[in-house]
Amino acid sequence: MGNITLKQLRYFEALARTGHFGRAAEVSAISQPALSMQIKELEAGLGSALFDRGARAVRLTSFGEEFAARAREILRLVDELEDAARIGRDQMAGRLRLGVIPTVAPYLLPRVIGEVTRAYPALELQLRETITPKLLQDLGEGRLDCAIVALPVSEPSLVEVPLFSEEFVLVRPLADAGKPVPSAETLREMRLLLLEEGHCFRDQALSFCNRQSVQPRELMDGSSLTTLVQMVGAGIGVTLIPDMAVAVETRLAPVSVAAFAAPRPSRQIGMVWRRTSPLARQLVQIAEVVRRCGVGEAG
């Protein structure tokens, strides 16, 4: 078996994650032929195929699945060694890979980026916006250093740091502005527009209404809060959004916003990272910056 390089492992991981040579080459910042050659050399050195090549996608072989788990662990450990060395040189410099859920990213990130850049000018923020399950997977596999999510995530391998709480508000058509604010029980009987499956905010809204699920005819799944608010403006139904999203999402939509009676629905926003992360002390400092930004948004 020939020598396996870290570069080959990173190219392999990108291809295993994307299932497509073109996308893997793009995220790896190399040409597709160069990536393909590296994968072929890796397979030749191992003496076994890692991928089944299809017309439109590639899939891991049985051996590839086993190899992928080990490769990801190796890459995670290498990244942690690099982080430990970086801490020794400069406590707040270099790359920081931050993940954020979609119902927070557009409203909080502009302030966070500005504050982090001012406080730590040598720090390079690399951002990823996606739903909580994918963020947690990326954290576990070492592709992210930390993530801003709704708590709790209840993952023993992760540290959870609460940052701030925010309430949910009701968004309904402008014509309903003078009507009484429905209770959670009344809201259960209304056409409630929700984010699509996979968004934690969907689950939080359903929990407030004491509904485990909704019938397809009763809602429209949206991929963003922007879509939901625009649909409310068109008279299709009502929705819930977090308070930090109100100024952005309702600015150009013919909707009204109302607060619920106590106890109001809310969520806890926090930061999470691996318990084994050598950046833990630095991440506590970053979390404090995010907390100040979030408290400012909530205020």
Image (spheres, rainbow, N blue to C red):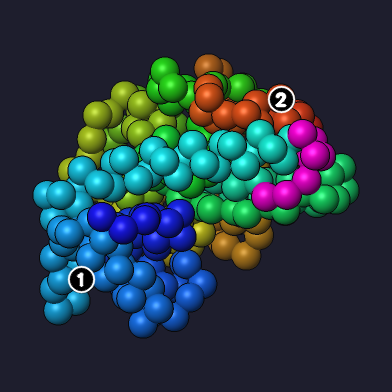
Residue displayed at 47% across by 40% down: 76
Picture coordinates of residue 255 (x, y %)?
A: 55, 55
Can you tell which mark lies on residue 131? none
Picture coordinates of residue 11 (x, y %)?
A: 40, 62
Three-letter code for the amino acid on which mark 1 is drawn: Ala
Foreground of the two, 79 or 117: 79
Residue 185 seen anywhere in this rendered image of the structure: yes
Foreground of the two, 148 or 262: 148
Left of 107 or right of it: where is 77? Answer: left
Picture coordinates of residue 258 (x, y %)?
A: 58, 38
Picture coordinates of residue 43 (x, y %)?
A: 23, 63
2 is higher (above) or lower (below) than 283: below
At label 1, counting other C-alpha atoms closer than 10 Å, the crowd grade (few under 14, some 14-19, many 20 or more) is: some
Residue displayed at 41% across by 31% down: 204
194 is higher (above) or lower (below) than 283: below
Q: Is residue 53 magenta?
A: no
Three-letter code for the amino acid on which mark 2 is drawn: Arg
Which residue, given by chain and number where applicable, does mark 2 sit on? 281
Which residue, given by chain and number where applicable, does mark 1 sit on? 57
